[in-house]
C-alpha cells in the first residue's frame, strides 16, 4: 500500500510539472489579450516606425528592423497582430529582448495554429525542404533564402498583385537579389552569375518588359520567368537528375510553353536520339542558350543566320561525337568553301545556312522521305531561294568535298589543273629568268634597245593597233580587273586582303554586282571581237595569228640561245610565238569562263540540263581558269609587253597604237622586211 501511494504521488507531481510547463509555454506563445489589435500595433510602432532602426541577426549581420505601417496594413497579414508571427514577444513588456525567435511560417500555414490562415499543402513545405535552398537552410547557411527573402517581410502581397515580390513581372528581380550578387555567387560557387543582366536582354525578358504574351512559338503563353523553368519551391540544381533544368528534362520544361516546337523536335533526329538515351543529343539550351536566349532575328542570337553555322558545328565538327555516333564529316569545311558559306561568313544573312535546308526543330536524316534534304525534296527545298531549279540538284552531293572516292571526275580535273598551272608558271618563270640572264650577258633575248634622243628611228612610229583594237583591249582590261577584284575574294576568302575587301558594309552585295557587270563586259567583248574578225582587218590579223611550224622552231631556237648553244636570235613576223600564245589563251579562257560562269550565274536553269556533280566541276574549272588567267597576265604578259628591258616601265602602244620604228625593226624584222622590202616605203609602213 505504501509503495502504491509513493508511486501515485510521483505520478501526480510529474503531471503537475507538465501542466505548469505547458501553461507557461502557452502563456508565452499566445498573444496577450491585455492589448487590443490597434494598441499592439501602436506599441510596436513606437520603435519600429524609425527608418534608421537596425538590429543584428544570429550571424551578426546588421539588418534593418524598420516596419512600414502602411505597407503592413496593405499586406495579406495586415489584419493580424504582430504577435501572431512574433509569438515569443509580450507587447505589454517592451522593449523585448534583443534576440527573438525566428518566425515560422509553417505554424499557421501548415500546423493551422491560426485557424483563419490559408492552408498550404504539406508537399509545398516538403518540396522546399528538399530543394537546394532548403538544404542550405538545413546546413545553417546564413545566405540561404527563407520564405521572407522571396515573399517579403511585412509587405507580403498576393502573387497576382503587380506589386508583389513574387508576381510574374517581379520574379526575375527577386531572384537576382541573390543570383546577381557577385560575392554571394563566388562564395557559393553558383555556376551562373549576372543572370538578370542576361535575362533582361533575352527574348523572354524583353517580352516581359513589354507586357506581351507569346505569339508564334508559344501562342498565348506569358513570357517565361525563373520559376517557369526552375520551379517554385522545389528548385534543384541542374546537376540533379530530377531538376526541371537537368539536361534530360530541358525539352519537356521548354515544351510547357513551346508545345508545337516540342512535338516537332520529338520527331526529329535529335529528339529520337534524346528519347533513346543518347546523352549527347542536343536539347533546347545547346542551340538557344539558357538565360540569354535571343530571337532568331537578333544579330547576337546563337541561332541568328550569322551564328547558326557555328552553333551546329559545336556537335557536328566534334571528332569524338563523329566517331561515337557515326556523324558525317567535313560538313563545316564543305559549307565554308561554298558560295553560301563564304557570303554567310561576311555578313550576308540571306544566303542558305544549316536551318535553311535541314530545318530548325524538325530535322530529319536525308534518308527520310519527309526530310527537306531527301533527294526527292531537294528541288523544292532549293527552289525556295532558286525558283525553277532543275531536278539535277538531286544528282550529286550538296556538301561536296570532291575527294577521289566521292567524285573521280572532279578529282581528276582538279589534279590536272593544279599540275598544269604549276608546270606552266614554272616554265614561264624559268623562261623569263633565262631571258633576263641573257640580256645581262649581252646574249640574244627578247629585250630591245632603249630609245635614245639622237636615234632618228626612235622618233618615228609605226601603227601597231588600230583604234578598234585599242578599244577592245581597253574593255578587256576593265572587264578582267573587275572580275579579278570581285572574284578572287570568293576563291581565297581566308586571305587578309579578301577579308579587308569584304569587311565594308554592303561589300558582299557590291562584289556580286561588280562581278556580273564585268561578266557582261566580257561577253559583250566576245561578241564584238567575233564581229571584228569578219572585217578585212580582222581576217588579216587572224591570218598572221595562225600557229605554224616556225613558231615551234622559234621556241627551240630561243632555248638554244638561253643555254649557250646558239648566238642567233630567231626573226619574228607581225606576231611572235609569245603573242600568239597569249591570244589563243585569251580566246580559250574567255570561252571557258563565259560558259562556266553562265552555269554558275543561272544555276537553276543549268541544273535542268546538268547533274549537280557536273555543276561542281564547272565551278572548279571557272575558279582555276580565273587563277590561270591572273597568273599568266601578272607573270607572262606584263613582262613581255611592259617590263622587259628596253620597254620598262610601260609600252605606250596600248594607248597610242604605235611603236617606234627602232623597236618594230628589232622585234618584227620579218614584217618590216615584208612591208618595206617588197616595194613598200617607210611612210606606208608607218600607216601615214
Image (spheres, rainbow, N blue to C red):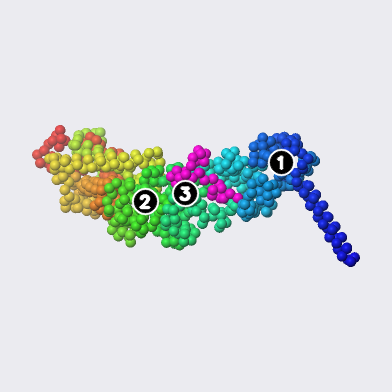
Q: Is residue 601 found left or right of 309 in the rendered image?
A: left
Q: Is residue 167 found left or right of 341 in the rendered image?
A: right
Residue 164 on image: x %, y %:
60, 40
Q: Find numbered disc 1 in the image and state the secondary structure of the residue it sits on.
A: loop
Give the residue pinned by disc 2: 357
Q: Residue at x 45, y 45 (%)?
A: 219
Residue 629 shows up from this direction: no
Give the residue pinned by disc 1: 81
Give the residue pinned by disc 3: 258
Asked if the stretch drawn in magenta spans residue 637, the answer is: no
Q: Residue at x 44, y 50 (%)?
A: 260
What is the CA distance from the residue labelled 2 to the residue labelled 1? 67 Å
Task: Give the residues drawn in magenta, as a range.
Answer: 206-233
* Circle 2 Cα neighbour tier, 10 Å, few/some/many (<14 / 14–19 / ≥20): some
What is the CA distance from the residue labelled 1 to the residue labelled 3? 46 Å
What is the CA distance from the residue labelled 3 to the residue labelled 2? 22 Å
Q: Residue at x 75, y 46 (%)?
A: 30
Amino acid at each position: 500500500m505504501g509503495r502504491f501511494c509513493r508511486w501515485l504521488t510521483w505520478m501526480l507531481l510529474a503531471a503537475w510539472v507538465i501542466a505548469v510547463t505547458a501553461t507557461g509555454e502557452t502563456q508565452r506563445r499566445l498573444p496577450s489579450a491585455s492589448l487590443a489589435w490597434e494598441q499592439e500595433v501602436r506599441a510596436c510602432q513606437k520603435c519600429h516606425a524609425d527608418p534608421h532602426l537596425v538590429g543584428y541577426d544570429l550571424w551578426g549581420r546588421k539588418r534593418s528592423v524598420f516596419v512600414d505601417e502602411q505597407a503592413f496594413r496593405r499586406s495579406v497579414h495586415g489584419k493580424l497582430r504582430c504577435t501572431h508571427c512574433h509569438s515569443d514577444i509580450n507587447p505589454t513588456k517592451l522593449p523585448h529582448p534583443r534576440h527573438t525567435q525566428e518566425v515560422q511560417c509553417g505554424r499557421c500555414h501548415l500546423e493551422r495554429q491560426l485557424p483563419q490562415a490559408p492552408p498550404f499543402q504539406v508537399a509545398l513545405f516538403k518540396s522546399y525542404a528538399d530543394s537546394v535552398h532548403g538544404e542550405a537552410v538545413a546546413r545553417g547557411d546564413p545566405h540561404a533564402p527563407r520564405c521572407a527573402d522571396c515573399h517579403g517581410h511585412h509587405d507580403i502581397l498576393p502573387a497576382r498583385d503587380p506589386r508583389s515580390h513574387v508576381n510574374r513581372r517581379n520574379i526575375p528581380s527577386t531572384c537576382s537579389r541573390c543570383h546577381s550578387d557577385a560575392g554571394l555567387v563566388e562564395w557559393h560557387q553558383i555556376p551562373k552569375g549576372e543572370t538578370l543582366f542576361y535575362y533582361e536582354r533575352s527574348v523572354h525578358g524583353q517580352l516581359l518588359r513589354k507586357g506581351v504574351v507569346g505569339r508564334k512559338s508559344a501562342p498565348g503563353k506569358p513570357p517565361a520567368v525563373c520559376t517557369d523553368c526552375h520551379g517554385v519551391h522545389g528548385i534543384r540544381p541542374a546537376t540533379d537528375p530530377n531538376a526541371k533544368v537537368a539536361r534530360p528534362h530541358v525539352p519537356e520544361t521548354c515544351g510547357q510553353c513551346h508545345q508545337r516546337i516540342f512535338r516537332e523536335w520529338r520527331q526529329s533526329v535529335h529528339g529520337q536520339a534524346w528519347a533513346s538515351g543518347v546523352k549527347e543529343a542536343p536539347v533546347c539550351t545547346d542551340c538557344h542558350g539558357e538565360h540569354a536566349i535571343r530571337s532568331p532575328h537578333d544579330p547576337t542570337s546563337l541561332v541568328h543566320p550569322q551564328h547558326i553555322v557555328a552553333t551546329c558545328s559545336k556537335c557536328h565538327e566534334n571528332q569524338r561525337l563523329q566517331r561515337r555516333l557515326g556523324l558525317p564529316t567535313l560538313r563545316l569545311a564543305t559549307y565554308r568553301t561554298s558560295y553560301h558559306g563564304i557570303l554567310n561568313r561576311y555578313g550576308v544573312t540571306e544566303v542558305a545556312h544549316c536551318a535553311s535546308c535541314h530545318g530548325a526543330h524538325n530535322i530529319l536524316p536525308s534518308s527520310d522521305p519527309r526530310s527537306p534534304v531527301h533527294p526527292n525534296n531537294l528541288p523544292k527545298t532549293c527552289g525556295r531561294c532558286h525558283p525553277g531549279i532543275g531536278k539535277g540538284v538531286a544528282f550529286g552531293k550538296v556538301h561536296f568535298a570532291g575527294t577521289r572516292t566521292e567524285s573521280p571526275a572532279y578529282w581528276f580535273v582538279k589534279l590536272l589543273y593544279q599540275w598544269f598551272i604549276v608546270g606552266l608558271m614554272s616554265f614561264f618563270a624559268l623562261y623569263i629568268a633565262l631571258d633576263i640572264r641573257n640580256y645581262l650577258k649581252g646574249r640574244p633575248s627578247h629585250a630591245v634597245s632603249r630609245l635614245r634622243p639622237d636615234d632618228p628611228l626612235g622618233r618615228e612610229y609605226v601603227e601597231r593597233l588600230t583604234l578598234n583594237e585599242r578599244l577592245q583591249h581597253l574593255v578587256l582590261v576593265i572587264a578582267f580587273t573587275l572580275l579579278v577584284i570581285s572574284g578572287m575574294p570568293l576563291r581565297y576568302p581566308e586571305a587578309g586582303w579578301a577579308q579587308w575587301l569584304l569587311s565594308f558594309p554592303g561589300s558582299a552585295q557590291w562584289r556580286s554586282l561588280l562581278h556580273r557587270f564585268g561578266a557582261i563586259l566580257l561577253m559583250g567583248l566576245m561578241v564584238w571581237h567575233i564581229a571584228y574578225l569578219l572585217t578585212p582587218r580582222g581576217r588579216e590579223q587572224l591570218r598572221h595569228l595562225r600557229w605554224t611550224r616556225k613558231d615551234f622552231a622559234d621556241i627551240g631556237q630561243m632555248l638554244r640561245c638561253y643555254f649557250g648553244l646558239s648566238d642567233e636570235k630567231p626573226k619574228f613576223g607581225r606576231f611572235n610565238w609569245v603573242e600568239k600564245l597569249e591570244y589563243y589563251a585569251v580566246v580559250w579562257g574567255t570561252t571557258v569562263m563565259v560558259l562556266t560562269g553562265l552555269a554558275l550565274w543561272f544555276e537553276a536553269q543549268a541544273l535542268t540540263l546538268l547533274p549537280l556533280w557536273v555543276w561542281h566541276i564547272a565551278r572548279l574549272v571557272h575558279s582555276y581558269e580565273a587563277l590561270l588567267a591572273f597568273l599568266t597576265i601578272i607573270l607572262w604578259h606584263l613582262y613581255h609587253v611592259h617590263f622587259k628591258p628596253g620597254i620598262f616601265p610601260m609600252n605606250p602602244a596600248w594607248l597610242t597604237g604605235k611603236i617606234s620604228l627602232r623597236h618594230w625593226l628589232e622585234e618584227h624584222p620579218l614584217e618590216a622586211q615584208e612591208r618595206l622590202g617588197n616595194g613598200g616605203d617607210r611612210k606606208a609602213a608607218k600607216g601615214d
